[in-house]
C-alpha cells in the first residue's frame, strides 16, 4: 500500500519536471530540489501519522473481538461467527447495547440491627506513668495468678476446704478517669442499632453487658449444699437486678451483682438462653460467653447471671426444687394443676407448679434434647456410654419408670408457680432417629407464641440475629459457619415437633400464666 501511494505521488512530479525542461539548467535544478524537499517532508509526515493510528485500530479490533460475544444489538442480533473467527466485527447498526458481566458479590446474611460501628482510634496509655501500675505489682499479680491456678487444680471437694477469694488477673489497675475508660471500651455484646432485638428486655441487655464486660472485683468458689460448688465472680457495678434486691442481704455469696462461671463444655447454656428468649418462654437466666485468662486456659466459658432469689435460705439450703416421680408428674398433667388459678384439692397430688409450665418445659427440652430434668435415666432414647445416666447406672431404672425421680425442677423462692430453666445441658449430636420423645409424653397443649415462631420459617434468621450479639460465643463456635450447623439441628427438630403436634392432635393455645 505504501509503494502504490509513492507511485501515485510521483506522477505529478514527473509531469512537473517535464514542463521545466525548457528552463535554464541552474533555474531548473533549483526548482527540482525545492519540490523534492517538500515532497520528502510530506511523505515522512504521512508515514509517521498513520503508524500510531493503525496500532489504535488494531487494539480496538482486538477488544471488539474479545467482547464480541457480549455485544448485542438493540434488536437482539448476535455477531456473525465468521467475523468472530477473523477477529474483526463489523457492526450492522450503530445503536449497539453493551452488557458488562460482573462477578456476583457474596453478601453477608442480613442481620437486622447489626451495622458495624465506626472504628475508633486506639489510645495508647503509658502504663509506667500510672502509680498503680508498677513492675513489682505486675509481678506479684502474675505470681498470685499462678498460685491460684495451681490451688484450683489441686482442690477436689469444697466440703473439705473453706471458701477462698480469687484475685482477677484481668484487672491490673484501675483508671483514674472512669468516664474516659468507659467511653473507649468496646462491649463484647454487639448491639449497633438503637434497640436490641425485641425478644430481649431492657434488663436482659443490661445483665448481658455486665456479664460480658464488668471488671471482676472478686472471685470465689463456694459450696452449694449437696450440689457441685459454684465459681462466682463479683463485678463492678452499682445496678442491682430487681429479682435480687429483696434477697441479696440474706446471702453472703454475692454482695452486689455477680455471675456464675461454668465449664467451657457447658456452652449450650448460651444457645439455650437465646432460644428461650426467642420463643417467648423467658424461663432461663441471662447467659453470655466470656474468657478469663487464668481459667480453663483462656477458653470461652458460659457465665450465668447470679439470681439470689433461687437461694431463699442461703447456699446451704440449696434451690427450691419440686420433688416428683414420673408417675406423679403424669398424674399432675391430667389434673391440670392451678389451671385458671383454681386451687387444687389437697389429695390431688399437684405440686406448686402451674400446668402451663410443664408444656413450656417439654417444648424447650425437646428442641435442645435436655434430658436431665424429665428423663434423667435416659429411658426415652439410646444413650452413649459416656452419658452420666449410664456411668451412674441410672439407665437400669427404666424398668420401673413410674418411680423414676424428676430432677432439676427449680422455681424461685417467692414465685412457686413458675419454673426456672437452669443447667441446660443440651445435645446437638443426636440424630432425628434417636430423639427423646419421652419428654413430650402426657403433654396435650403447647404455647402458641413458641409454636408460631417455629412455623414462621424465620427461626434461622432470628437466631442468627440473636446469637450475633454475643461476640465471644459467635467466635468460639467458628463464626457463621459453626452457628449455621447448630441452627440446622434445631430447624430439623422443629420440623419433627410440628409433625408430632399434627399427628397427636396437640392443641396450640395462648399461655399467659
Image (spheres, grey):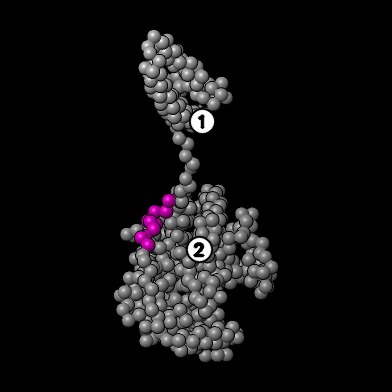
Q: Where is residue 151 in the image (x, y as percent from the top left)?
A: 57, 87
Q: Which of 396 and 480 is in front in this view?
A: 480
Asked which secondary structure carries label 2, the reply is helix
Please tell me which residue is depicted at 51% across the width and 59% down the height of the picture. Answer: 479
* Image height of 214 relative to 150, above or below: above
Q: Residue 119 carries which label?
A: none
User: Splitting the image into 4 quarters, where does residue 465 fall?
Assistant: bottom left
Asked which secondary structure carries label 1, the reply is helix
* Image height of 488 relative to 356, above or below: above
Main structural element of the magenta stretch: helix, strand or loop?
A: loop
Please tell me which residue is depicted at 62% across the width and 59% down the height of the picture. Answer: 430
Q: Position of residue 344 (x, y in %)?
A: 44, 68
Q: Residue 62 carries which label?
A: 1
Quarter occupied by the C terminus: bottom left
* Tag 2 residue: 475
* Part of the protein shown in magenta: 109-119
What distance separates the C-alpha of mark 1 from that of mark 2?
50 Å
Amino acid at each position: 500500500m505504501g509503494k502504490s501511494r509513492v507511485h501515485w505521488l510521483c506522477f505529478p512530479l514527473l509531469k512537473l519536471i517535464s514542463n521545466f525542461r525548457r528552463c535554464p539548467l541552474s533555474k531548473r535544478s533549483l526548482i527540482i530540489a525545492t519540490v523534492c524537499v517538500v515532497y520528502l517532508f510530506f511523505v515522512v509526515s504521512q508515514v509517521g501519522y498513520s503508524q500510531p493510528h493503525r496500532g489504535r485500530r488494531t487494539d480496538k479490533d482486538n477488544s471488539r473481538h474479545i467482547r464480541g460475544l457480549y455485544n448485542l444489538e438493540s434488536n437482539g442480533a448476535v455477531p456473525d461467527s465468521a467475523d468472530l473467527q477473523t477477529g474483526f466485527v463489523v457492526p450492522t447498526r450503530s445503536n449497539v447495547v453493551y452488557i458488562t458481566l460482573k462477578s456476583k458479590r457474596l453478601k453477608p446474611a442480613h442481620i437486622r440491627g447489626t451495622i458495624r460501628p465506626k472504628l475508633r482510634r486506639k489510645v495508647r496509655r503509658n502504663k509506667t506513668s500510672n502509680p498503680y501500675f508498677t513492675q513489682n505489682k505486675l509481678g506479684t499479680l502474675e505470681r498470685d495468678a499462678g498460685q491460684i491456678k495451681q490451688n484450683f487444680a489441686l482442690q477436689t471437694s469444697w466440703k473439705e476446704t473453706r471458701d477462698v477469694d480469687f484475685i482477677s488477673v484481668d484487672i491490673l489497675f484501675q483508671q483514674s478517669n472512669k468516664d474516659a475508660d468507659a467511653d473507649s471500651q468496646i462491649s463484647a455484646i454487639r448491639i449497633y442499632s438503637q434497640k436490641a432485638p425485641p425478644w430481649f428486655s431492657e434488663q436482659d441487655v443490661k445483665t448481658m453487658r455486665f456479664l460480658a464486660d464488668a471488671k471482676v472485683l472478686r472471685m470465689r468458689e463456694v459450696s452449694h449444699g449437696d450440689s457441685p460448688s459454684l465459681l462466682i465472680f463479683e463485678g463492678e457495678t452499682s445496678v442491682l437486678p430487681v429479682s435480687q434486691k429483696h434477697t441479696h442481704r440474706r446471702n453472703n455469696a454475692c454482695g452486689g451483682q455477680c455471675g456464675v462461671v461454668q465449664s467451657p463444655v457447658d456452652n449450650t447454656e448460651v444457645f439455650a438462653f437465646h432460644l428461650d428468649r426467642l420463643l417467648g418462654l423467658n424461663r432461663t437466666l441471662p447467659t453470655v460467653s466470656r474468657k478469663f485468662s487464668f481459667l480453663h486456659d483462656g477458653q470461652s466459658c458460659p457465665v450465668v447471671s447470679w439470681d439470689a432469689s433461687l437461694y431463699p435460705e442461703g447456699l446451704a439450703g440449696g434451690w427450691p426444687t419440686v420433688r416428683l416421680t414420673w408417675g406423679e408428674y403424669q398424674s399432675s398433667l391430667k389434673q391440670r394443676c392451678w389451671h385458671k388459678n383454681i386451687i387444687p384439692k389437697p389429695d390431688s397430688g399437684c405440686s406448686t407448679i402451674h400446668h402451663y409450665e410443664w408444656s413450656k418445659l417439654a417444648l424447650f427440652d425437646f428442641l435442645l434434647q435436655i434430658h436431665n430434668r424429665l428423663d434423667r435415666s435416659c429411658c426415652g432414647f439410646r444413650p452413649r456410654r459416656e452419658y452420666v445416666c449410664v456411668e451412674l447406672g441410672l439407665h437400669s431404672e427404666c424398668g420401673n419408670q413410674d418411680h423414676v425421680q424428676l430432677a432439676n425442677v427449680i422455681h424461685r423462692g417467692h414465685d412457686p408457680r413458675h419454673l426456672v430453666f437452669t443447667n441446660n445441658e443440651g445435645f446437638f449430636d443426636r440424630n432425628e432417629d434417636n430423639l427423646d420423645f419421652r419428654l413430650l409424653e402426657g403433654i396435650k397443649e403447647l404455647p402458641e407464641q413458641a409454636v408460631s415462631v417455629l412455623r414462621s420459617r424465620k427461626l434461622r434468621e432470628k437466631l442468627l440475629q440473636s446469637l450475633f450479639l454475643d461476640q465471644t460465643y459467635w467466635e468460639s463456635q467458628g463464626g457463621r459457619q459453626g452457628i449455621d450447623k447448630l441452627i440446622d439441628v434445631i430447624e430439623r427438630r422443629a420440623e419433627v415437633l410440628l409433625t408430632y403436634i399434627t399427628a397427636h392432635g396437640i392443641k396450640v393455645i395462648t399461655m399467659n400464666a
